[in-house]
Amino acid sequence: MKLNDLKTETLDVDTVAKALKELGHPTRLMIFQSVIRAGFQGIAVGGLQKSLNIPGSTLSHHISGLASAGLITQRREGRTLYCVAEFTQLQSVIGFLQDECCVDENQENEQQKGDQQ
């Protein structure tokens, strides 16, 4: 599966704000970046803790915030807990911002064209 193949959904401003707030913390951003780099299979929490050198309780706190924003989910395989990026949510957050890019400028240009005719 490729990232571009994911179907996105339209998010409300509160959902996007929550996701961006969670990503606005440097430690959570590093965690999320590591989870994204792991791909669709995710990364073991123990591996995250080791690679980022974060105490377990701190890591758990930050993972909880990312999960509450819908940016990651967790799955258990035996005794191993994995963090998996919710790429659809990420794409939706990015899309929320991209969809608004230059909208006012384009409307203004259309209005100016109409006034000139």
Image (cartoon, rainbow, N blue to C red):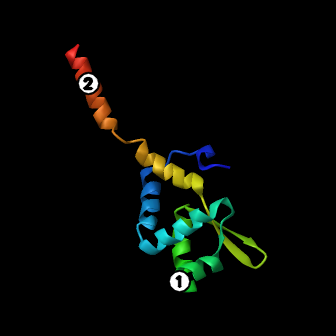
Q: Secondary structure at mark 1?
A: loop
* Front residue of 81 and 34: 34
Q: Which image quadrant is residue 51 in?
A: bottom right
**Comparing labels 2 and 1, the label whose residue is closer to the camera:** 1
**Cα distance between the residues tagged 2 and 1:** 54 Å
Residue furthest out toward the right: 78
State the image coordinates of residue 35 (x, y, percent, origin top left): 58, 67
Q: Is residue 88 left or right of residue 26?
A: right
Q: Secondary structure at mark 2?
A: helix
Q: Amino acid at mark 1?
A: Ile
Q: At 26% across and 30% down in the image, what residue appears?
A: 108
The residue under label 1 is 54
Q: Is residue 98 left or right of residue 52?
A: left
Q: Amino acid at mark 2?
A: Gln
The residue under label 2 is 111
Q: At 56% across and 67% down in the image, what residue appears?
A: 67
